[in-house]
Amino acid sequence: MLKPNEIILFPLNLVLNPGGRQSLRIFEPRYTDMVRECTRHSRPFGICATLEGDDGKLAVCATGTQARIVDFYTLPDGLLGIEVEGELRFHVEAVNARDNGLSIASFNLLEVELDHPVPPEYSLLAELVAGYFNATKQTQKLNPQLLDSASWISYRLAEVLPLELIERQRLLEMPTPNMRLQQLLEWLPRFRSDEEDDDDPAGFVPA
């Protein structure tokens, strides 16, 4: 049984942001056990990105995001599929392994960042996120009020821009939405198409 300050870790080649959704394919027995335990006790598990270090070996990042299971389904190959939603960010303090191979981490939750309206200097970023949802026909998922949330805009843009994994992790670790928005604004010219058109006036190239 997990203690209140413990969480099962699921290291993956991705970054889950607070409020983000991610579909996962479960095929290892230990992670089937994880899904069963988290469902039974209504607890999230922790997703931490795995990055290649200077020595070429993979290392699990200490900062991750709680993942709450929101849906189950059977994949065409018969394996279990789940959809999770990102909740709070956390920092791993220590890790121990169970006999079934699951990693159990003691952790501290990171302080919830103070949200605020998108500052005028970052209004283009909010327009890009709205344009992405329109272009991908996901407007039914878009609450118009969220377009003025600096935190929500910064996390969603971090998800849809074609960033390197280490860049996504860097954004996740930033303590304020304005720091995230500023970094995204500085990176934005990398993702502008050579020729802008009426369908994509910002030249935005989604991931």
Image (cartoon, rainbow, N blue to C red):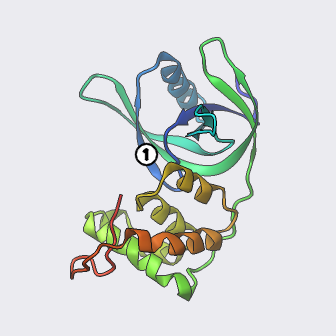
**Image coords of residue 193 (percent x, y):** 30, 72
Q: Residue at x 62, y 77 (%)?
A: 116
Q: Please identify the quadrant where the N terminus is shown.
A: top right
**Image coords of residue 166 (percent x, y):** 56, 50
The reply, left or right, for residue 118 in relation to residue 63 is left
Give, as a three-letter code, the residue at label 1: Gln
* Residue located farthest toward the front when viewing the structure as drawn: 55
The answer to whether one can see residue 105 in this image is yes
Secondary structure beneath dot 1 equals strand
* Residue located farthest toward the left when viewing the structure as drawn: 198
Residue 110, above or below 191: above
Residue 62, above or below 31: below
Q: Residue at x 59, y 50 (%)?
A: 87
Residue for badge 1: 22
Q: Residue at x 46, y 65 (%)?
A: 157
Towards the viewer: 165 or 28: 165
Can you tell which quarter of the image residue 139 is in? bottom left
Towards the viewer: 54 or 26: 54
Q: Please identify the quadrant where the C terminus is shown.
A: bottom left
**Image coords of residue 187 (percent x, y):** 50, 70
Towards the viewer: 78 or 169: 169
Towards the viewer: 204 or 71: 204
Residue 64, above or below 76: below
- Classed neighbour count for the residue bearing mark 1: other residues with Cα under 10 Å, few (<14), some (14–19), many (≥20): some
* Residue located farthest toward the top when viewing the structure as drawn: 99
